[in-house]
Structures are given as structure tokens and as C-alpha cells.
Amino acid sequence: MCKMVYQWYTNCAQYTGSGAVTVDHSRRNTLKRYTSRFPALVTRLAYYIQKQWVPWSNMPSRVGVMSRGVNINGREWPRGSCCRYTRDFAGNRGQGAIRMGTVMEYYTFYGGNSGQAFVLLREHNVVSTQGVMFVVDASYQAEHVVHIDNLLFLLHLAPYFNDDPNFKCCLPVATAHPLSLDEMLE
């Protein structure tokens, strides 16, 4: 079993809100696939390589596809977890906008490309907010691949008793970013 740990800031301590990400590779939770089979991931990786946001010169040929085994700040974020995230794509439409989504799978890499992880998320539209609770339309909207650093916080997804069974309540559970970024995100 291979365990990778990296942080947003290398001098952060291992405390809640430090941004520590742990990825556990094992035969049971990781499937090795060809990167070319995932067009949304290829597009995202090409953008990161073009912007030189990753220390790679070319596209990795193999990717590890995971549905569990990723811990952020000591808390597991398995497939089906609801979360808030941001997107970092070219252009100004929606750049930096905070979105809601459900984790579908994680993409990790091996060898010289290790340490980078990407997430496939299904986006949900926020219908309303009531205090810290968000009401979302849980029906399928769109899928996005983002870097794992774009995850903001984990939410608990609970049913919302209304006329539409697709409406769900989201309640904050745990932060995914360093505490120093709290002021910038508010």
C-alpha cells in the first residue's frame, strides 16, 4: 500500500483546517486506467500543464481511479460526499464562484507525477439557503473535474421534505482548506 501526504502549505501543522490531504492507494480501492479514457480529466490536465501549475511536461499515460481512500484533515471524503468547491478555468465566467457538488471519483497519478489528485464532481444548483443550511437540487446538472485543492468543505446531505424529492439539505461538516483562507473566502 502506498500512502501520499501533501499539504497546501508545507509549513502547516497537522491540525483541523490545515489542508492536509492523505491518499491511500491499495489494490482494493484503486483501478489503474489509461488517462485517455477520461476526456474531462485530459482537458483539465492539459490546462494545468499549459499554465505550468503542475511540474509535468507531458500528460501522464496511467491514472489511478478511486472511489474512496482520500482523507482531508483526517476526515474521509468517499464517493457520494456532498461538498462545496470552486472552479479554476480560463475566462471569467464562473471563475472563483463557489459551487455545490457530489464527489464521483478521484484521479491520482504514479511515479514522477505523484502528489497531484483531481476530483470528478457532479454539480448541484443551490435552491435556497437558510442560515448554514443549503437546499440543493440533487438531480444531475453537470460534471466537472477540479484539482483537490479546490474543495472547500464537506457537507452532510439529508432529505428535504418538500414537494420535490430532488431537494436535499446540505449541512457543513468539516473544512477542507487552511484556516488562514477563511477570511478570503467570506
Image (cartoon, grey):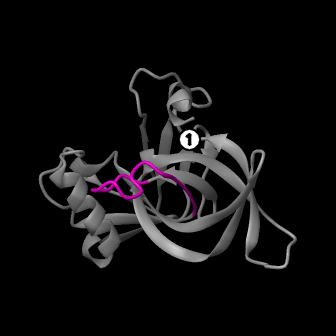
Please state the horizontal and vertical placement of residue 90, each as a whole percent of the image.
27, 56
**Towards the viewer: 128 or 8:** 128
Task: Tell me which secondary structure the magenta stretch mostly adopts.
Answer: loop
Q: Residues within 10 Å of mark 1 (few under 14, many from 20)?
A: many
**Towards the viewer: 170 or 12:** 170
Displayed quadrant of residue 107: bottom left
Q: Residue at x 57, y 35 (%)?
A: 186
Q: Residue at x 22, y 48 (%)?
A: 112
**Towards the viewer: 137 or 37:** 137
Q: How many marks?
A: 1
> Is 154 covered by the magenta stretch?
no
Is 108 left or right of 129, judged from the image as shown?
left
What residue is disc 1 on?
176
Above or below for 15 versus 168 = above
- Inspect the image, locate mark 1, and give the three-letter code of the amino acid beneath it: Ala
Label 1 secondary element: loop
Above or below for 79 versus 88 = below
Q: Residue at x 57, y 62 (%)?
A: 101
**Towards the viewer: 145 or 27:** 145
> Is 93 covered by the magenta stretch?
yes
Is 184 left or right of 56, judged from the image as shown?
right
Please state the horizontal and vertical placement of residue 182, each as a whole percent of the image.
56, 30
Q: Where are the magenta residues, as a range?
A: 87-101
Above or below for 163 versus 62 = below
